[in-house]
C-alpha cells in the first residue's frame, strides 16, 4: 500500500495478520511488553493489497517510560516470502523422493511410528506394511536405458496411488523398492486384497517412449495388531516376506511369519562367513577344459571359483557369487581368482612345449569391471607370472556390460589394449544388445548352454546357433559352445562352424591337478 491508502492504526495492522498466525503474534508482543523478552520478533503471514498473503519477519523494540511501562514500539517488517518458500521446499525435498514425488523413507518411518502409537492405544487397530520390489527392473534399465527406467518408476508410483485409500501412505525407499502403509485395516484380508489389486494394476503395459514395457512386483506383507513392534522391525519383516515372494516366483505376495526369520538369519550368517572366507582364502578354483572342435585338443581352461566352507563343505558359485557381488566382496575374491588362475597358467605353461596353445579364462563380475584398478591388477598379474596377455581371457556377460555400458566399454577397450582376450559369456540369454555388439571389443562369443542343449533336436535352436556363429564370424570373433553334453550336440556344433566347445561331454570342472592330467591325454580321447 501507499501512504494514505490505509489507516495507521494498530487495529488496521493487526487485522492484516493471517488469522492462523494471530494468536502467536499477539503472544510474542505481549511477552515483550511485559518485559519477558528483550525484543519482539515474529514470523507470520500478512494480507497483501492483491489479496494474497505474504510472509513477514516483524521485529520491534518497545520504548518505556521511567516506570518501565511500554508506551511505543519501533521496529521493522521484512517480506521473507521467498526465503520461506525456499525453506518449505527444502523441508519438502527432505521428506520426498525427487523422482516420483512420493514420501521417502524418513517420512514413511515417521508415519509408521505414529500409526504404531495409535495401535498401542486402540485394541481394534491393525496396520500392515507392504514391501514391494519390481521384478526384473534391472532388465528394463539395462536394455531401455535409465531414462525409461525412471519413467517406469514414476508410472508405477502413480498406479500404486490408485490402489490405496486416502489415509494410506505409499513411499519409495530407493531403487525399485516401494513400501505401503495400510492404517487401521479390518483384518489381514484387507492387506492381501490390496497386494492383489496392486499386482493387477501393474499387469497392464506401460507405454514409455514408444515401447510397451511390462513389469510386475513381488510383495511382502507384515501386519501389526498390538503396536508393540518397532517401525524398523516391521519394515524388516515385510522385506523378508518380499524375498520369500520373489523366491516363489515373481509377481507373488507373501505374508510374513516367524519361520522366515530363520532364512534371513541364515543369509546374514552366510555373509559373515563370506567376509571371513576372503581373509582366510577359503576359495579354490576348478578348471573346465575348452576344446578345439577341429583338432580335439584342449586349448584353454575356464577357472570356476568354489568355496570350501569350514562347516558346510564345497559351495558352488550360484550360492555365493551373487551375495559376494551385492556386498562388494566380489572385489577381493575376484582379485584372488585372477592371481590364482594366472599362477596356475604359469605352472601349466612351464610344463608344456612352447608351441602349444593354452589360455585360461576368468569370469569378471560387474563390480570388478567397473573397478578403476582392474587394469593395473591385470597388468600386475601378467607381469608377475610372465604370461602372454593373449593367454588370459576375461569373461563378461551382456548384463555386466549393460549395467553401465559406457564405463564398461571404456574398461573393455583398456583391457583389450593390454592384449587379453574378451569372451562374451552366456551369449543369447541377455538383453537385446545385438546393436551394440560391434562396439564392444569382444573377441569371442560363448553360446549359452540353453541353446546348445537343444541344438541336436533340430528345430529353431539350430537356426539360432547358426545365426550366432555367422554373426560372430562377421564381427571377427570366434565361437565357444557352452554346456556340450552329447556327441550329437558336438557333431551339430562342429557342422555349424563353432570353433570351440566346453561342457560335461569333455569334462566337468576339475581341480588343478586333474586338469593337468587332462592336458597330458592324447588328443583323440576327449573329442
Ligand atoms: P559360467 O561362466 O557360464 O560357467 C559355466 C557354468 O556352467 C559352470 O557352473 C559349469 O560348471 C557349468 N557347466 C559347464 N559345462 C556344463 C554342462 O555340460 N552342463 C551343465 N548343465 N552345466 C555345465 P559353475 O561352476 O557352477 O559356475 C556358475 C557361474 O558362476 C559361472 O557361469 C559364472 O557366471 C559364475 N562364476 C564362476 N566362477 C566365478 C568367478 O571366479 N567370478 C565370478 N564373478 N563369477 C564366477
Ligand atoms: Mg564363464
Ligand atoms: Mg557361461
Image (spheres, rainbow, N blue to C red):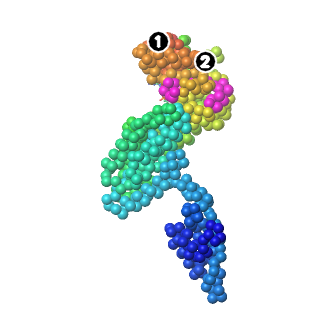
Magenta residues (range)? 409-432
Work out whether 307 lies above or below 297. Answer: below
Q: Is mark 1 within 8 Å of ligand 1?
A: no
Q: Secondary structure at mark 2?
A: loop
| Residue displayed at 50% across by 13% down | 496
Q: Quadrant of residue 202?
A: top left
Residue under the point 61% across and 83% down: 70
Image location of residue 351, percent across then percent down? 61, 20
Residue furthest front as drawn: 5
* Front-lying residue, 138 or 90: 90
Q: Is residue 350 visible?
A: yes
Depth check: give the residue in front, 243 or 402. Answer: 402
Image coordinates of residue 312 in percent, x first then y, are 44, 38
Query: Would you say residue 428 sits in the magenta stretch?
Result: yes
Of mark 1 and mark 2, the one earlier in the sequence is 2
SS for tag 1? helix
The image shows residue 452 at horizontal and vertical percentages of 46, 19
Q: Position of residue 504 (x, y in %)?
A: 46, 21
Query: Distance of mark 1 from mark 2, alpha carbons?
Result: 23 Å
In the rendered structure, are the residues bearing label 1 and label 2 in contact, judged by CB atoms less than 8 Å apart?
A: no
Q: Is residue 268 above or below residue 342?
A: below
Tell me the residue at 55%/41% (across/down): 328
Identity of the residue drawn at 36% across and 56% down: 184
Residue 31's label in the rendered image is none
Q: Which mark is residue 491?
A: 1
Question: Which quarter shows the N terminus?
Answer: bottom right
Q: Which mark is residue 476?
A: 2
Q: Quadrant of residue 410?
A: top right
* Magenta region includes residue 179: no
Residue 136 lies left or right of residue 225; in this view the side is right
Amino acid at each position: 500500500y501507499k501512504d494514505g491508502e490505509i489507516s495507521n492504526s494498530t487495529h488496521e495492522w493487526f487485522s492484516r495478520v493471517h488469522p492462523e498466525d494471530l494468536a502467536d503474534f499477539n503472544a510474542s508482543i505481549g511477552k515483550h511488553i511485559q518485559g519477558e523478552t528483550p525484543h519482539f520478533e515474529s514470523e507470520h503471514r500478512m494480507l497483501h493489497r492483491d489479496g494474497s498473503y505474504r510472509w513477514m519477519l516483524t521485529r520491534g523494540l518497545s520504548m518505556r517510560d521511567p516506570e518501565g511501562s511500554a508506551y511505543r514500539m519501533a521496529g521493522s517488517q521484512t517480506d521473507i516470502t521467498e526465503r520461506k518458500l525456499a525453506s518449505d521446499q527444502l523441508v519438502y525435498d527432505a521428506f520426498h523422493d525427487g523422482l516420483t514425488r512420493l514420501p521417502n523413507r524418513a517420512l514413511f518411518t515417521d508415519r509408521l511410528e505414529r500409526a504404531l502409537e495409535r495401535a498401542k492405544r486402540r485394541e481394534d487397530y491393525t496396520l500392515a506394511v507392504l514391501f514391494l520390489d519390481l521384478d526384473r527392473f534391472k532388465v528394463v534399465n539395462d536394455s531401455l536405458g535409465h531414462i525409461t527406467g525412471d519413467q517406469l518408476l514414476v508410472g508405477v508410483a502413480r498406479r500404486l496411488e490408485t490402489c490405496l485409500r486416502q489415509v494410506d501412505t505409499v513411499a519409495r525407499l530407493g531403487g525399485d523398492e516401494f513400501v505401503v502403509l495400510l492404517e487401521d485395516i479390518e483384518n489381514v484380508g484387507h492387506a492381501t486384497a490390496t497386494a492383489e489389486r496392486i499386482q493387477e494394476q501393474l499387469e497392464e503395459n506401460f507405454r514409455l517412449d514408444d515401447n510397451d514395457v511390462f513389469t510386475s512386483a513381488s510383495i511382502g506383507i507384515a501386519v501389526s495388531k498390538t503396536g508393540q513392534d518397532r517401525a524398523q522391525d516391521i519394515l524388516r519383516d515385510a522385506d523378508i516376506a518380499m524375498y520369500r515372494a520373489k523366491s516363489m516366483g515373481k509377481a507373488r505376495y507373501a505374508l510374513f511369519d516367524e519361520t522366515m526369520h530363520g532364512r534371513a538369519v541364515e543369509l546374514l550368517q552366510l555373509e559373515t562367513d563370506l567376509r571371513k572366507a576372503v581373509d582366510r582364502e577359503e576359495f579354490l578354483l576348478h578348471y573346465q577344459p575348452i576344446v578345439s572342435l577341429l583338432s580335439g585338443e584342449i586349448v584353454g581352461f575356464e577357472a570356476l571359483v568354489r568355496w570350501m566352507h569350514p562347516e558346510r563343505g564345497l559351495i558352488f558359485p550360484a550360492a555365493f557369487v551373487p551375495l559376494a557381488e551385492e556386498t562388494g566382496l566380489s572385489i577381493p575374491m575376484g582379485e584372488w581368482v585372477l592371481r590364482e588362475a594366472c599362477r596356475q597358467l604359469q605352472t601349466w605353461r612351464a610344463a608344456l612345449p612352447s608351441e602349444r596353445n593354452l589360455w585360461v579364462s576368468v569370469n569378471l563380475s560387474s563390480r570388478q569391471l567397473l573397478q578403476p584398478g582392474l587394469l593395473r591388477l591385470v597388468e600386475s598379474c601378467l607381469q608377475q607370472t610372465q604370461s602372454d596377455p593373449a593367454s588370459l581371457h576375461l569373461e563378461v556377460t551382456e548384463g555386466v556390460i549393460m549395467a553401465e555400458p559406457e564405463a564398461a566399454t571404456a574398461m573393455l577397450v583398456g583391457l583389450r589394449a593390454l592384449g587379453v582376450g574378451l569372451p562374451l559369456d552366456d551369449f543369447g540369454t541377455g538383453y537385446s544388445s545385438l546393436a551394440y555388439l560391434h562396439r564392444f571389443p569382444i573377441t569371442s562369443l560363448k553360446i549359452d548352454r540353453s541353446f546348445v542343449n537343444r541344438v541336436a533336436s533340430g528345430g529353431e535352436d539350430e537356426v539360432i546357433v547358426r545365426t550366432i556363429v555367422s554373426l560372430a564370424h562377421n564381427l571377427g570373433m570366434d565361437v565357444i559352445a557352452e554346456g556340450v553334453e552329447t556327441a550329437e550336440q558336438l557333431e551339430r556344433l562342429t557342422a555349424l562352424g563353432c570353433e570351440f566347445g566346453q561342457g560335461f561331454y569333455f569334462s566337468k570342472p576339475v581341480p588343478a591337478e586333474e586338469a593337468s592330467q587332462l592336458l597330458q591325454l592324447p588328443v583323440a580321447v576327449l573329442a
